[in-house]
Image (cartoon, rainbow, N blue to C red):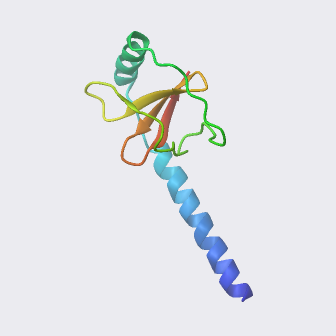
Amino acid sequence: MRMHLSTAAAGFLLLASVGAVAAQDVIIQPEQETVIREYVKKQPLASVNLLGVELNIGSALPETVELREVPDVQYRYVVVDNRTVLVDPGTRRIVKIID
């Protein structure tokens, strides 16, 4: 029984670390970030408050949050707690927080 718990715990930690590394692999070029910032400034959104969701790279946003498109960019954006976040629309995970 003890061996099963240790194996399960190790597997969970491995999966968690793989997810964290994958979330950190997203690189947004400075030129693309400038385009995103300018677009977001021209298309302001009301901030949403999400109880129980921490704004961290890799955190998933619930399906109830509407993601907005940025033309010619693969990511979507939303304003949460007055912070603009870029989100992978396929996984709904935060890839970048733009302050």
Q: Residue furthest bottom?
A: 1
Image label count: 0
Nearer the observer, 12 or 26 = 12
Q: Is residue 93 left or right of residue 90?
A: right
Residue 20 drawn at (x, y percent):
54, 51
In the displayed structure, would residue 14 be above or below residue 68? Answer: below
Q: Residue furthest right?
A: 2
Residue 58 drawn at (x, y percent):
53, 45
Q: Is residue 76 left or right of residue 83?
A: left
Nearer the observer, 22 or 77 = 77
Residue 26 drawn at (x, y percent):
42, 40
Q: Residue furthest top?
A: 42
Q: Residue furthest front?
A: 64
The quarter holding residue 76 reads top left
Nearer the observer, 40 or 63 = 63
In the displayed structure, would residue 4 be above or below residue 61? Answer: below
In the displayed structure, would residue 43 be above or below residue 64? Answer: above
Residue 1 drawn at (x, y percent):
72, 89
Q: Residue at x 60, y 67 (%)?
A: 12
Q: Residue at x 38, y 21 (%)?
A: 36
In the displayed structure, would residue 56 be above or below residue 9? Answer: above
Where, quadrant-wise, is the C terminus in this rendering? top right
